[in-house]
Image (cartoon, helix red, strand yellow):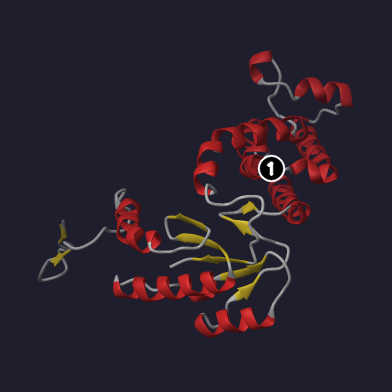
Amino acid sequence: MWRCERSLPHCILSQVGAQQGDPAGPFLFCLVIQAVIENLNSELNVFYLDDGTLDGNPNTVLQNLDTIIKSCWNLGLQINLSKSELYFCSTYKKGVHESFNQLSPGIKVLQDDVTLLEALLNVQSIAKLLNQKHDEIRLLFSRLKFLQSHIAYFLLRNCFSIPKLTYLLRTSPAWAAIEIINAVDRSIKVAFESISNISFDEQQWCIASLPIKFGEFGLRKASDIMLPVFLASVNSVLGFITLMLQNITDETYHETQLITSP
């Protein structure tokens, strides 16, 4: 491929590597780092494009991080150390932290808010993340009043309510923070009442939240769908989970988890 600007006296060739927006870019990147990933010996070794997660004995994880840094450098890639994160699955150990910090200066030690690709990895973080999402959608709801009613309703149903929560509901047991889920449902109800200029009692709102194919408004309740969507998600990825965790048993003791990105 090449590009030629009229204002320039010459053409700039683009012949090496994937370019910005190239749909083959992620595939080619994965091919490049595949050999590096296969040489790592952590008990848990999971990569999604440039996001990698290693888990196991601290010394093994540390050695693997060193391997990643050196191998990627030889490939022309550089680890973004400012985005690397360390999580102690058991108790915090200062010596382990210092060893990782020496190899990756400024590495961040996670406390309870542990996520991977925006998916929660522990129950303790559910309430905090749901509250953040609730604040985001309430801000969006407050701006719907400046739009025409039909446009506001379309955005509320198709963009700003359940669609904003779908990924979180599919990847976390949201029922552990049911009071926040109920608060989200009330916010959706209040937003629609403001748009339609109609007040609903609880029975009317239950009917109105049914799908459009049943003649209602299709503003689904998060409390109604949180369990089905989570179970559907778990069932759909069960094969991949089994494949990724095939070397891990209930007796395996994990001390350190590293989350890093080149």
x then y, percent, for residue 46: 49, 55
Q: Is residue 224 visible?
A: yes
Q: Residues within 10 Å of mark 1 (few under 14, many from 20)?
A: many
In the image shown, does 173 or 61 lie closer to the viewer? 61
Left or right of 57, for residue 35: left
| Circle 1: residue type | Leu
Q: Mark 1 highlights which residue?
A: 144
For the C terminus, give its image quadrant.
Answer: bottom left
Is 162 placed above or below 28 here? above
Give the quadrant of residue 128: bottom right
Q: Is residue 153 visible?
A: no
Give the quadrant of residue 242: top right
Give the quadrant of residue 207: top right
Is 58 placed above or below 249 here? below
Is 26 placed above or below 260 here? above
Q: Residue at x 16, y 61 (%)?
A: 15
x then y, percent, for residue 143: 69, 47
Left or right of 39, for residue 127: right
Q: Residue at x 31, y 54 (%)?
A: 25
In the image shown, does 16 or 57 lie closer to the viewer? 57
Q: Residue furthest front?
A: 251
In the image shown, does 5 or 204 lie closer to the viewer? 204
Is 254 placed above or below 235 here? below
Q: Residue at x 16, y 68 (%)?
A: 7
In the image shown, does 1 or 166 lie closer to the viewer? 166
Q: Residue at x 67, y 41 (%)?
A: 169
Q: Residue furthest left?
A: 10
x then y, percent, for residue 63: 48, 74
Q: Secondary structure at mark 1?
A: helix
For the N terminus, give its image quadrant.
Answer: bottom left
